[in-house]
Structures are given as structure tokens and as C-alpha cells.
Image (cartoon, grey):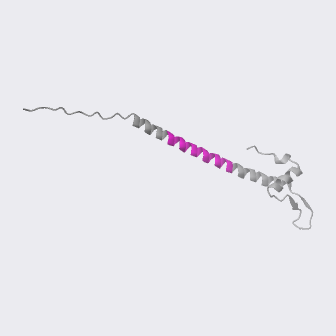
Amino acid sequence: MVQKDYWKMSEVELTKLAEKYNIPPLSTRSGDPWAETYFNRDRVINTLLARDNAMRTRLTTFVSIIALALSLASLWVSYTSLKVKARENVQPIPTVQPTASVQQ
């Protein structure tokens, strides 16, 4: 996953991303609802970066789980193949036929 450079994006591109991920792009200067609103570029970019980091963590976790599953499968295949080879190499115990001895 390649990190996007949000700082080089225009306000239109950032607004589209903010709307896509439900990030409120507008803020007021003083907290007063009647005050002037402006595009809060820093908040949008920081939220997008936090989202990217969370997604990267999920991806890393998923890849780690897949690697662990493959390692366990490889271990199982190795174990079973060794078990089969051990059975093939077992020599049967020779049986001794009793000889009949005649006593008279």
C-alpha cells in the first residue's frame, strides 16, 4: 500500500475524499454556529492519515495470519511425509520356521 500525499491534493479532491469517508470538511473559526465557516484542511488530512494507518495495520495483521497458516500447513505436510517414509522403511520381522526334530 502506497502512502498518498494528501498535502499536494487540491481542496476539491480532499472534499471528495472527506465526503466519501464521512469526514466533516468545514469548521467555524470561533465555535459560534453563526461564525464564518472554512475548509479545515488540517483536520481532513490528519483524519485521512489516521484512516490509512488503521487500514495498513489491518492489512499487516491479515498478511501475518496468512503466513502463520501457511507455516502450520507446511509443518503438517512435513510431519505426515516423514511418518509415511518411516512406515515404508520398516522391515518386516523375519519369522523362523521351526524345524521338526524327530526323537526316537
Q: Position of residue 62 (x, y in %)?
A: 64, 48
3 or 42, which lies in front?
3
Q: Position of residue 102 (x, y in %)?
A: 11, 32
Q: With 81 as the anchor, is 19 left or right in this view? A: right
Q: Is residue 67 magenta?
A: yes
In the figure, 41 relative to 70: above or below? below
Q: Position of residue 51 (x, y in %)?
A: 75, 53
Q: What residue lies at 51% left-to-right and 40% top-to-bottom?
A: 77
Q: With 69 as the anchor, is 17 left or right in this view? A: right
Q: Position of residue 87 (x, y in %)?
A: 40, 37
Q: Residue furthest left?
A: 104
Q: Is residue 64 magenta?
A: yes
Q: What residue lies at 57% left-to-right and 46% top-to-bottom?
A: 69
Quarter of image, res 38: bottom right
Residues rendered magenta in the picture? 58-77
Q: If the image is split into quadrants, where does the C terminus sit? A: top left
